[in-house]
Image (spheres, grey):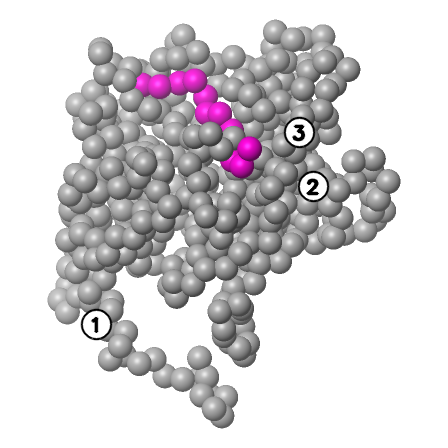
Amino acid sequence: MRNAVGAPERPIWADIFPNVARRYFYLRSARPRLIEKIDTISQTGQDDLFQEVEPWSRWLRWNDNVAIFQDRDLSWCLEDGLLIYLENVSSSYIAYDLETSRRFSVPFDGTDKIVRRLRLAHSILVIEWCEREPRELFTRKEIHRHFVTAFDVRRPTESASVGPQDLWEIRFRSEWEIHNLGLPVNRQNRFFSTHTAAHYALYLWQHEGSPGNEEDPAEQLTVWNIENTSPYRPSEDSLGTKKPDPTEPQPRVIKRFGRGALDFLGIRQRDTPALREILLDENNIYVHEEEHRWLAGEHSSPLPPRNHYVRTTGIPLSGVGPRWFDDCCADGDIHMNFCPRAGSAARFGDGNRSGMPDRFDGTWPGWAPCWRHEEFPYLTLSDVVDSGAGVRIVARQCFVMEALSSFVLPKISLKTESDETSEVRFADNMWRQLLGKGKIVGDERWVVGEDRNGSITVVRF
């Protein structure tokens, strides 16, 4: 902020300090200061508005106990305190600023669309969707054309006037088609995606296979460069007569890996997929896979690992070079885990605990996701990591046992303290409030999840 003569205003410490002190009191106590509920459109009976991509048919089974291994996608997203969700009254997407409690519309018309996934990351909102009405291929199979619509999401500059309509700016960035023929909307086909400010990547797995090899699932990993904005919308140009010249700025494919290339790289999934997610950084795409000794279901491996096994394969986005490969197993038994990189201190950025390069913090996507088995046989479903604030909220589950805990590094103190963190558990009812979809997001100010009734829960500290 600046004063009337343009000089930077000094922070008002008398206002800031009590807010921070109060926040850390609640974080260290694992207690919410305030709980807010947001009603969204229920997915039940609303397939014409949101139909998430089906997860793999894999779950955990031990004796008579069964637990979810990979939850379904959220129908909302959050970054930098801005929550995007499908509002239940207007049936339109709303942006909610958690800091100012102001809401405004997202310029996306979903009346003739089925949204498959949405994600807000790197100040870009990505909405993956398909046409509501199917089209029939020559094989008489019904398919839906799938597209990605991207928006730039920006806060106003300091010099801009601040009012109800200009707290955030959400502006159309570009649009592209993710498959040239279209995809069925069913329970058999899957696709996983990720994006940064420069790239968008999508892994596609089609159960029906491809012409001439219908018994083997069709697999493809594609990467687009999305740095350039473009007004062209392929969804409004079904005949392709308005396509821009290839030399004009627009999203474009820069990498495509078919089954042969995926096989060579060691990440082809076949009928027993282990892929959990794909991630990106500036130079590489990372494929995260995991398997578990207690997995069951159609897509589970007939040869399970000894314990809980996670691995990451990194592939360069440009040029040629060696792949990055990192794997890890919960090296212990069903009662104890000995993973050298697990634990809250590692997630705060102590990347040198296992002798690995310390230039990468604990959230670098090239690491195998050891945090998933850090308290084996517990499975870490999700966590919120605010490394700068020294705060981590962790959700772990072992069949019927559930634990939502807070870890706060002792960085703010009048005396010297060790760097060890202590675990403080939230009350049991907080799990039901936040982990209905097995995912939490946020930072030191708030944690956001979904309850078992489908409402979004905002826990403020």
Amino acid found under the numbered disc labelled 2: Trp
> Residue 26 got which mark?
none
Q: Quadrant of the N terminus?
A: bottom left
| 9 relative to 269, above or below | below
Q: Is tag 1's residue or tag 3's residue first in the polypeptide sequence?
A: 1
Observer-nearest of 40 and 55: 40
> Residue 133 got which mark?
3
Q: Position of residue 343 (x, y in %)?
A: 26, 40
Position of residue 240 in the picture relative to residue 123 (left or right): right
Q: Position of residue 337 (x, y in %)?
A: 22, 28
Judging by the rendered image, the residue that carries numbered circle 2 is 176
Residue 369: quadrant of the picture: top left
Amino acid found under the numbered disc labelled 1: Pro
Instruction: Point out the stretch of residues depicted in magenta.
Output: 48-60
Using a 10 Å C-alpha cutoff, classify the residue at mark 3 as few (fewer than 14 neighbours), some (14 to 19) or many (20 or more). few
| 215 relative to 227, above or below | above
Position of residue 313 in the picture relative to residue 197 (left or right): left
- Separation of marks 3 and 2 at Cα, in angstroms: 19 Å
- Per the picture, the main secondary structure of the magenta-coloured stretch is loop
Using a 10 Å C-alpha cutoff, classify the residue at mark 2 as few (fewer than 14 neighbours), some (14 to 19) or many (20 or more). many
The residue sitting at 35% across, 35% down in the picture is 437
Observer-nearest of 331 and 197: 197
| 106 relative to 405, above or below | below
- Separation of marks 1 and 3 at Cα, in angstroms: 55 Å
Q: Is residue 51 magenta?
A: yes
Using a 10 Å C-alpha cutoff, classify the residue at mark 1 as few (fewer than 14 neighbours), some (14 to 19) or many (20 or more). few
Judging by the rendered image, the residue that carries numbered circle 1 is 18
The residue sitting at 74% across, 52% down in the picture is 231
Observer-nearest of 215 and 153: 153
